[in-house]
Image (cartoon, grey):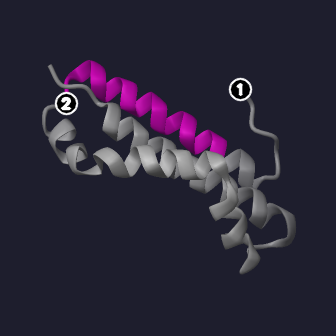
Amino acid sequence: MRTIKETKDLIELITTLGVLIGREVSGDGLQLTDVLKLLESSEFRGNLEKALDGVLLVPIELGDLSLSEGFDLSMLVLEAFRKILAAFDGEEEAS
């Protein structure tokens, strides 16, 4: 039985990237030095490593998606979008 772990890891990476960019843009705008901050982020590096390890499996997972898995992914994407929007608004990320 397949899972959607690799797809979830990719969504987590995109969320982390979006939140980090949102925080920088909401502060002083996006600067060249912000790229260095991104690369220094242990959260981003950890999520990047997880996502890249299984990125080739994402199309396979999505091709064999069950209704329940689709619902889980939808909820994960909605939560990710909320976190990214909050970061761009300069709000602290709610748990």
Q: Which residue is drawn at 56% across and 52% down?
A: 45
Q: In this view, does 18 lie to the left or right of 24?
A: left
Q: How crowded is mark 1: few (under 14 residues within 10 Å), some or many (20 or more)?
A: few
Quadrant where the image shows the C terminus: top right
Few, some or many C-alpha atoms within 10 Å of disc 2 (few <14, some 14-19, many ≥20)? some
Q: Position of residue 83 (x, y in %)?
A: 65, 41
Q: Where is residue 26 in the image (x, y as percent from the top left)?
A: 80, 62
Q: Residue at x 62, y 45 (%)?
A: 43
Look at the picture and state if 26 lies above or below 87. Answer: below
Q: Mark 2 points at which residue?
A: 65
Residue 50: x %, y % from top left: 42, 43
Looking at the rendering, in which quadrant would you find the N terminus?
top left
The kind of secondary structure element at disc 1 is loop
Magenta segment, prevailing SS (helix, strand or loop): helix
- Along the horizontal axis of the image, is 46 left or right of 7? right
The x, y position of residue 36, in whole percent, is 69, 70
> Which amino acid type is shown beneath numbered disc 2?
Leu
Q: Which of 87 and 6 is in front in this view?
A: 6
User: For the residue labelled by badge 2, is the local secondary structure a helix, a strand or a loop?
Assistant: loop
Q: How far apart are marks 2 and 1 (CA)?
A: 28 Å
| Three-letter amino acid code of the residue under disc 1 | Ser
Image check: 46 left or right of 19?
A: left
**Is 67 within the magenta?**
yes
Please identify the residue farthest to the right as the structure is shown. 28
Residue hosting label 1: 95
